[in-house]
Image (cartoon, grey):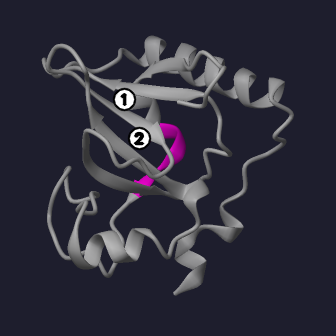
Amino acid sequence: MIANRRPLIFHEDVFYEYFKPYRHPLSHHDIWGGHGLETYGEDFDLVRTLDPLYVWTVVDADEGSDQWITPGVRRVNRVCYLLTRLPHSDMAIEFRCHHRASSLTPLGMKRQINRLQRAIADCALGPMRPASSPEAQW
């Protein structure tokens, strides 16, 4: 979450569908469905070398047992880091990971993706292109 801006909140399914997380080939652990990078050791050293616009932090909620996917590299309440094919461009955006796993319906997914795309357009970010994703660095 970026200071002074209320974040847009979406279901975690939208994160996977739109931003396309992937497993870095130098990852040393199998966490968060195989996509996660650890918050310590060689994985964390790797995270610090990557373009922060493609790095997300999974954090524990302050209350309850939900977790959140937030843009950038966080150091508090972190569970792991995720890398995506598309940048977050420092948008005030968060994805809720319900402790009781549930999936969006196809219509719900379409509506949330459309809402996300409108928000991106409103931020005048233009088309998000994966050409400079961290994958291009290897």
Return the residue nearer the eye: 29 or 63: 63
Magenta span contains residue 20:
yes
Q: Residue at x 80, y 29 (%)?
A: 123
Local crowd size for mark 2, using a 10 Å CA cut-off: few (<14), some (14–19), many (≥20): few
Residues at badges 1 and 2 in contact (C-beta under 8 Å)? yes
**SS state under label 2:** helix
* x, y percent for residue 93: 55, 28
Residue, disc 1: 12
Rendered view: 92 above or below 32: above
**SS state under label 1:** helix
Amino acid carrying label 1: it is Glu
Rendered view: 109 above or below 108: below
Q: Residue at x 56, y 59 (%)?
A: 52
Amino acid carrying label 2: it is Tyr
Horizontal relation, residue 31 to residue 91: left or right: left
Tell me the distance, in whole angstroms, between the alpha carbons under discs 1 and 2: 7 Å
* x, y percent for residue 67: 25, 28
The chief SS type of the magenta part is: helix
Horizontal relation, residue 37 to residue 19: left or right: left
Local crowd size for mark 1, using a 10 Å CA cut-off: few (<14), some (14–19), many (≥20): many
Q: Which residues are magenta?
A: 17-21
Horizontal relation, residue 117 to residue 44: left or right: right
Which label is found at residue 16? 2
Question: How many circles with numbers are drawn on the protein?
Answer: 2
* x, y percent for residue 77: 25, 38
Q: Residue at x 70, y 68 (%)?
A: 131
Q: Residue at x 69, y 28 (%)?
A: 117
* x, y percent for residue 92: 61, 28
